[in-house]
Amino acid sequence: MAEAPVDERAAEDERVAPAHVGRHPGPKEYIRIAIVLAVITALEVVVYYLEGAQDYLIPILFVFSFIKFTLVVLWFMHLKFDSRTYARFFVMGLAGAITLFLIVLLIFQVFSS
């Protein structure tokens, strides 16, 4: 059996799998994001050892962690480039996990003095 021409395969692939909403990044963009993540990680380590930052350590590290989490989710999990439906499912799951975590903390009276 003869193979179908490339154009027919591409047309068939588009019918089977929906096209992505945006372009996907190339290797250079992934390397840039990895460098940004490494710099943020280095800043986290530096902040940990700074004497004057001990009072604000947790909020600063939380902000750095949130930035890193967002970059990983958007680029390495492709949520920035795929259908918004995937992003909605991810955010719904994340909101559910945070809600459950807070409920457990409240049950164990972590926030009471």
Image (tube, rainbow, N blue to C red):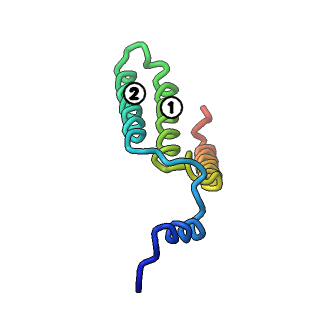
Q: Residue at x 55, y 71 (%)?
A: 12
Q: Which amino acid, mark 1?
A: Phe
Q: Quadrant of residue 33?
A: top left
Residue 84: x, y in percent? 64, 51
Image quarter in which the C terminus is found: top right
Tell me if label 1 and label 2 are in contact, CB under 8 Å.
Answer: no
Which residue, given by chain and number where applicable, does mark 1 sit on?
62
Instruction: Using the image as rendered, state which of residue 64 and residue 9 is in the foreground.
Output: 9
Q: Residue at x 41, y 86 (%)?
A: 1
Compared to 57, does 25 lie above or below? below
Residue 44 — which label?
Answer: 2
**Residue 75 x %, y %:** 48, 44
Q: Is residue 15 left or right of residue 63?
A: right
Residue type at the position of mark 2: Glu
Q: Is residue 78 visible?
A: yes
Sequence-wise, the earlier of marks 1 and 2 is: 2
Q: Is residue 112 above or below residue 24?
A: above
* Secondary element at image label 2: helix
Label 2 neighbourhood size at 10 Å, few (<14), some (14-19), many (20+)?
some
User: Is residue 26 or residue 103 the one in the foreground?
Assistant: 26
